Amino acid sequence: MPWERARAAARRLGERSRPGAAAREPLAGALGATLAEDLVALVGIPSYDAAAMDGYAVAGAGPWTVVGRALAGGGPSVGLRPGQAVEIATGAVVPEGALAVLPYESARRSGRTVAGEVQPERHVRRRGEDTAAGTAVLPSGTVVTPTVLGLAASLGYDTLTVRRPRIAALVTGDEIALAGVPAPGAVRDAIGPMLPGLAAWAGARLDRVDRLADGAADLASALHDAARRPAGSVLVVCGASSRGPADHLRAVLDEAAATVLVDGVACRPGHPQLLAHTGPPDRPETLVVGLPGNPHAALAAGLTLLVPLLAALGGRPDPASGGAGAPPRLPVRGDVRPHGADTRLVPVRIDADGEAACARPVGHDRPGTLRGAAGADALAVLPPGWSGPDAELLWLPR
Ligand SMILES: Nc1nc2c(c(=O)[nH]1)N[C@H]1C(S)=C(S)[C@@H](COP(=O)(O)OP(=O)(O)OC[C@H]3O[C@@H](n4cnc5c(N)ncnc54)[C@H](O)[C@@H]3O)O[C@H]1N2
Ligand code: MOO
């Protein structure tokens, strides 16, 4: 399947599997998830008429008689009559009847009397002047960043209703080692360590990575176990998607009567990738992504199928495309050759020196190595027969 169609298929599967996945999370746990509802102000900003400066809240024309003091957290003080003032701290409730706040720097105090120049409403932040209570301030689909959490707290929230797709991963291969320097014939798992960050970047959470020996029986029982997870959960299978004797994923999916939506993608690296789901076509249950075993190929497939699927499941834009809107494009400068029939994904660094930004290939881009991608900013997307100069960029997770 052409690369663009594979990405679109992943996105569509995420969109139609989405409903039902929202949950309430405490603010402290919601970072990185996606808002599942509009964020509506439970109180205004500010939530009461507040002093913006330390000084005097004054009523009517001056000079004024100082009749009291209002401190932040002290609650409303008595109303003022024209000619009266209270000494006031930044953040304290401005008393009824006050016209403005006169900062200390502009005030002349003598005994109980204070004088100075004020303009009406100066240094008073009126209740709701930034945001009125009841206003929808952020739409559903917004990424929960540290700033969003701060805003939600200002608006009175203790919890947020968010989406955070859940993933489990299986790393297959008898040769795979999970720790240490691999012995000859063994290979360190390089995909499992990438998955938590890739998932978080797309607004999802990786619950577990299990190692599986080659063999159809273990894979079938892992798929069976995955069915106990909530509908819309994702199972990532690493390194069982090609056509070798130990590559059983297709057979196991057939056995489970799964629907295979993508079986191989015309891209390099990342040819043998797979997207499938169990359950009926109109009610997908477990969503299955097969990533190739070669680590750079797995990364390319992660950006082609997994990240778009997860972002759509959460209801947010694909982070590899830089969020909503058209994906970024830059001229590619350096030695790159397109493939005749497949889309090439080439690790590039963005070079902003000189007159105009461009994307420079970094090399070390064979399927078996992450060396190029680890030092790159993005993958440049070269469609079959590309002749330049510009290419679409897929951002790499940071
Ligand atoms: N006859 C064909 N052979 C192959 C094809 C093909 O189309 N026809 N495609 C090649 C391409 S391209 C890739 S990519 C690989 C993908 O194969 P699998 O997904 O089945 O993965 P394996 O065969 O298990 O492993 C391939 C390679 O990657 C290493 N590997 C596996 N898992 C990991 C891991 N978690 N971390 C690091 N490295 C891993 C494994 O040792 C192999 O060297 O198939 C080609 N063959
Ligand atoms: O296309 Mo394979 O996925 O290059 O290494």
Image (cartoon, rainbow, N blue to C red):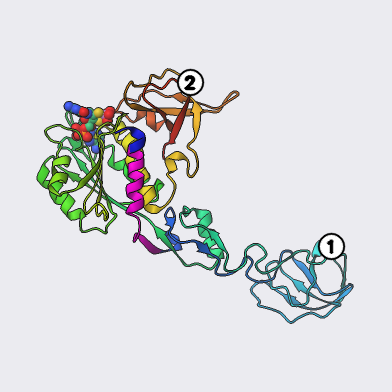
Mark 2 crowdedness (10 Å alpha carbons): few <14, some 14-19, many ≥20: some
Tell me if label 1 and label 2 are in contact, CB under 8 Å. Answer: no
Residue at horizontal 52%, vertical 56%?
A: 148
Note whether 229 is above or below 169 in the view shown. Answer: below
Residue at horizontal 47%, vertical 55%?
A: 144
Residue sitting at the far top: 335
Q: Can residue 301 be seen in this view?
A: yes
Give the percent coordinates (x, y) of residue 176. 19, 37
Mark 1 crowdedness (10 Å alpha carbons): few <14, some 14-19, many ≥20: few
- For label 2, the SS is loop
Amino acid carrying label 2: it is Arg
Note whether 28 is above or below 303 in the view shown. Answer: below
Note whether 351 is above or below 327 in the view shown. Answer: above
Q: Is residue 285 magenta?
A: no
Residue at horizontal 34%, vertical 33%?
A: 3
Lower position in the chain sequence, tag 1 or tag 2: 1
Q: In this view, does 149 lie to the left or right of 243?
A: right
Amino acid carrying label 1: it is Ser
- Residue under label 2: 333
Give the percent coordinates (x, y) of residue 96. 74, 77
Give the percent coordinates (x, y) of residue 338. 37, 21
Q: Is residue 317 left or right of residue 56?
A: left
Q: Is residue 20 magenta?
A: yes
In this view, the mark in front (1 or 2): 2
Q: Can residue 182 be seen in this view?
A: no
- Residue under label 1: 106
Give the percent coordinates (x, y) of residue 154. 56, 64
- Closest to the observer, 110 or 169: 169
Q: Is residue 74 left or right of residue 255?
A: right
Instruction: Tell me which segment is drawn in magenta.
Output: 6-24
- Closest to the observer, 271 or 361: 271
